[in-house]
Amino acid sequence: MEKKEIVITHETLFEILKREKDRTELQKLDASFFEDVVNYIREKRSILGNESPFSADEKRNTERQIENIRRILKDLYDKREKKVIGMALDKSRTKSNVMDTSALLNEEKMLFESLVALFDKFRQEILYSLLNESVPAIEERKAENEKMERAEEKSEARKDTKLVRFVHAVPKFVGKELEEYGPFEEDDIANLPNEIADVLMLKGRAEEIRED
């Protein structure tokens, strides 16, 4: 059985919080940290039971300790949460595949992955629009995406790209992965990713050239 690195006490919790405040990086805790903390608090609360043999002074001291533990846990969560948010933001910005996430507890890893996905989504939606000189319209874009998804589901054979002819001139624009396209003149022909081609056709800027 793996030996625990830290035995949970009021003093060790205080030291864990102090280290978390003093260090820039997220400190590593036992995988069972949350479970151990809950068990420790329950043990403390058992002292307050009606049948407890402990004295009134010991019970009051235990109550103060439990309140202190609650404050420590809140501060510890706030510090670690801030670091997890920073890690997720760095991951979304840099797309790095070598980020060390070993110090994340399982629940924190779920938070980290959810935040990365959220940051990625809004970064694409907002920055994508701004770089194309458009006011971000996430709800409108969501409706367009849903409409395109329904159209794609009805299609029997789905390709990765579409061959289109431009009905109107289109200035240079940026794709969701920040790749550049264009500029295109009227009657220009281009092979574009499905999603981009669908948006252009939806806006009446291009029409698909179907191969017989």
Image: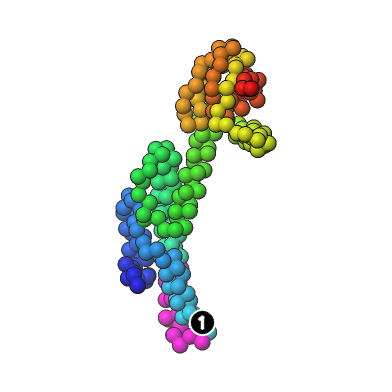
* Residue in front for this viewpoint, 162 or 201: 162
Using the rendered image of the protein, determine whether residue 47 is visible from the camera's viewpoint. yes
Q: Residue at x 57, y 29 (%)?
A: 194
Is residue 57 or residue 130 the one in the foreground? 130
Does residue 43 sit above or below 205 in this rendering?
Answer: below
Q: Name the residue nearer the viewer: 211 or 196.
A: 211
- Of all residues shown, which one is farthest toward the top? 186
> Measuring 47% from the left and 29% from the top, which residue is drawn there?
178
Residue sitting at 49 percent across and 41 percent down?
A: 119
Badge 1 marks a residue whose secondary structure is loop
Give how far across and how far down residue 77 sits, in percent.
Answer: 44, 57
Percent coordinates x, y for residue 74 in the rendering: 45, 59
Quadrant of the rendering where the N terminus is positioned? bottom left
Q: Is residue 97 above or below residue 8?
A: above
Foreground pick, 22 / 39: 39
On screen, residue 135 versus residue 12, left or right, reads: right
Q: Is residue 56 magenta?
A: yes
Residue type indicated by callout 1: Gly
Q: Would you name the residue on which mark 1 appears?
A: 49
Q: Quadrant of residue 14?
A: bottom left
Residue 61 within the magenta-colored segment of the rendering: yes
> 39 above or below 86?
below
Magenta-highlighted residues:
51-67
**Residue 129 in sight:** no
On the rendered structure, is 147 left or right of 35? Answer: right
Residue drawn at 45 percent across, 73 percent down = 39
Q: Residue furthest front?
A: 212
| The image quarter in which residue 17 lies | bottom left
Instruction: Relative to 96, say whether 47 is above or below.
Output: below
